[in-house]
Image: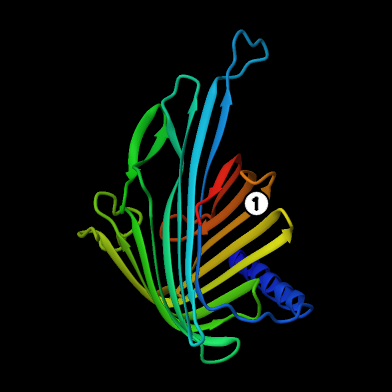
């Protein structure tokens, strides 16, 4: 499968590159206790046309972002909690506002410090959306999703590896649940059971999660998170969720964000899904 090969090559490039880069820097003394970070932002885009002979339509778009990290680092363990909340919509011409981005994601990872680099962990993640999602085709509006419909949950246990402050990775066995209510197709329903519609899908497999946070320059940061899930029932089908964000700080409160996300789940679509966004706006750190 070509997608798996590309993901593997990029994964190894990120991992090995950051590992080699880190060897050039001396180790820092560990800092124990809670590390807290809460950042929120808003991005706005507006265009207004009047008697514009070159053509075009009025447009308005907005997007809200809120992220947090609460990490309790101690001598014998680390407990990392993070969340990502994003919502935005766009209005073009006389059309009503349409959702452009919508994501809720929570993660909690407890790591026991057994060795210097390799340590056991337990983790859980949850992912869904805020508002209903619609498909717009042939001037028709059809609802296809909603809050917790679908909702994704994953629990895992395994071994984590963190060679430096830039990259950390974990590998373990995992349980994955997909929960639906009014929209079981194509998220949870098994197409092979014609006489029954499943609203909950359980999968047992292995997970691999790699996080990278690289301060490229004094005012720019690249963050990448690659999540892979291998269901044992269909081991040749790998679920991929790869989120990349490049942020440039123009000033203390103004920034530019470039976001590229790749998603692949054969049960939902046989083709990979890509989302790309560039945003310019206001950001504020609460902690």
Name the residue at 74% across, 57% down: 218
Relative to 59, is 266 on the left or the right? left
Q: Is residue 263 above or below residue 229?
A: above
- Work out which quarter of the rendered image holds the N terminus and state it: bottom right
Query: What is the basis of the colouring in this image?
Result: rainbow
- Please tell me whether mark 1 sits on a helix, a strand or a loop: strand
Is 281 placed above or below 118 here?
above
Q: Residue at x 64, y 46 (%)?
A: 252
Can you tell which quarter of the image residue 161 is in? bottom right
Q: Measured from the top left, where is residue 141 in percent x and y?
A: 36, 32
Q: Depth check: 191 or 63 in front?
A: 63
Residue 133: horizontal and vertical position, in percent?
Answer: 37, 42
Residue located beneath label 1 in the image:
247
x, y percent for residue 279: 60, 41
Name the one closer to the observer, 191 or 10. 10
Query: Based on the displayed image, in which of its 4 quarters is residue 222 positioned?
Result: bottom right
Residue 13 % position (x, y): 71, 71
Q: Nearer the viewer, residue 26 or 172?
A: 26
Dot 1: within a 10 Å radius of its alpha carbon, few (fewer than 14), some, or many (20 or more) residues?
A: many
């Amino acid at each position: 499968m070509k997608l798996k090969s590309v993901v593997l090559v990029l994964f190894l490039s990120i991992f090995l590159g950051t590992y080699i880069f880190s060897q050039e820097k001396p180790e820092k003394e560990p800092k124990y206790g809670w590390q807290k970070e809460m950042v929120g932002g808003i991005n706005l885009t507006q265009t207004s046309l009047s008697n514009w002979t070159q053509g075009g339509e009025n447009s308005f778009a907005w997007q809200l972002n809120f992220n947090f990290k609460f990490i309790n680092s101690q001598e014998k363990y680390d407990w990392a909690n993070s969340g990502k909340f994003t919502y935005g919509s766009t209005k073009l011409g006389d059309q009503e506002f349409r959702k452009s981005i919508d994501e809720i994601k929570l993660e909690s990872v407890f790591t026991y410090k057994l060795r210097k680099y390799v340590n056991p962990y337990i983790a859980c993640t949850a992912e869904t959306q805020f508002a209903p999602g619609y498909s717009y085709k042939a001037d028709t509006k059809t609802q296809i999703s909603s809050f917790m419909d679908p909702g994704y949950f994953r629990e895992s246990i395994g071994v984590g590896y963190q060679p430096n402050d830039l990259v950390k990775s974990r590998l373990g066995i995992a349980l994955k649940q997909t929960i639906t209510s009014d929209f079981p197709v194509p998220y949870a329903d098994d197409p092979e059971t014609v006489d029954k519609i499943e609203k909950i899908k359980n999968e047992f497999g292995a997970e691999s999660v790699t996080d990278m946070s690289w301060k490229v320059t004094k005012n720019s940061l690249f963050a990448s998170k690659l999540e892979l899930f291998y269901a044992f029932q269909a081991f040749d089908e790998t679920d991929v969720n790869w989120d990349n964000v490049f942020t440039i700080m123009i000033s203390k409160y103004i920034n530019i964000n470039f976001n590229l996300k790749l998603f692949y789940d054969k049960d939902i679509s046989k083709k990979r899904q890509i989302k790309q966004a560039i945003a310019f706006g206001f950001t504020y750190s609460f902690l």
